[in-house]
Image (cartoon, rainbow, N blue to C red):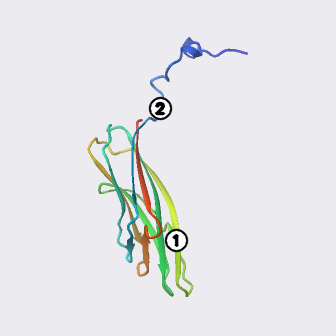
Amino acid sequence: MAIIKPNNNTLSAITALPAAISTGKVLQVVSTSNATDVAFTSTTYGDVITLNITPTKTTSDILVQAQLQYQGNTSSGQDQGTGFKILRDSTELLTSGGYQSYLYDFGDSIDNKTNFSVSYLDTAHNTTSQVTYKIQGNNNTGGSTLTFNNDGKSMLWLMEIDQ
């Protein structure tokens, strides 16, 4: 069996990865939670949870992770769809295609409590100034009530990752 010697060194002589290999080092993590009810009865988007981070490098990535809790209530004959967006300051990074969830009402009132997770890797913040990330939600169908954080809380984590 042959012994492989990277760069003609013994394995004990290797103390670090070559410079060309990115290690993906985590530079910082910030987090928040929101247990305050945020209700929607229209298709207009509104803030569910917000968090600031000040990147240490312009070339780093920001991993956005959220766990959102919400409850949909429909009255007789109304369906309900849930939508969301992720924003960096005023820039939309991700918008749910169609509906994150949808309640079909076949004539009775429906209550549905659920959680969902969403992640997004922001590779283009390009700043060392404070940045605000927001998760926004809406009631895509309007009319009925959709309430975030009413039976728990939503959480948001931002992780700055060195490239």
Residue 42 image position (x, y, % from top left): 37, 76
Element type at marker 2? loop
- Using the image, tell me which numbered label, if any, was put on residue 113: 1
- The numbered mark, 2 or 1, whose residue comes first in the sequence reads 2
**Hey, which quadrant is residue 147 in on the image?**
bottom left
Amino acid type at circle 2 is: Thr
- In this picture, is 86 found above or below 43? above
Does residue 118 appear to the left or right of 92 in the view shown?
Answer: right
Element type at marker 1? strand
Residue 109 image position (x, y, % from top left): 52, 84
Does residue 23 appear to the left or right of 37 in the view shown?
Answer: right
- How dense is the environment of label 1, judged by Cα within 10 Å: few (below 14), some, or many (20 and up)? some
| Residue picked out by circle 2 | 23
Mark 2 in CB contact with mark 1 (< 8 angstroms)? no
Residue at (50%, 58%) from the top-left corner?
Answer: 117
Amino acid type at circle 1 is: Lys
Question: What is the spatial separation of the Cα atoms under label 2 and label 1, in whole angstroms?
Answer: 40 Å
- Using the image, tell me which numbered label, if any, was put on residue 68: none
Q: 64 or 19, which lies in front? A: 64
Residue 162 image position (x, y, % from top left): 40, 36
Residue at (48%, 75%) from the top-left corner?
Answer: 72
- How dense is the environment of label 2, judged by Cα within 10 Å: few (below 14), some, or many (20 and up)? few
Q: Quadrant of the C terminus?
A: top left
**Hey, which quadrant is residue 56 in on the image?**
top left
Q: Is residue 97 visible?
A: no
Residue at (49%, 66%) from the top-left corner?
Answer: 100
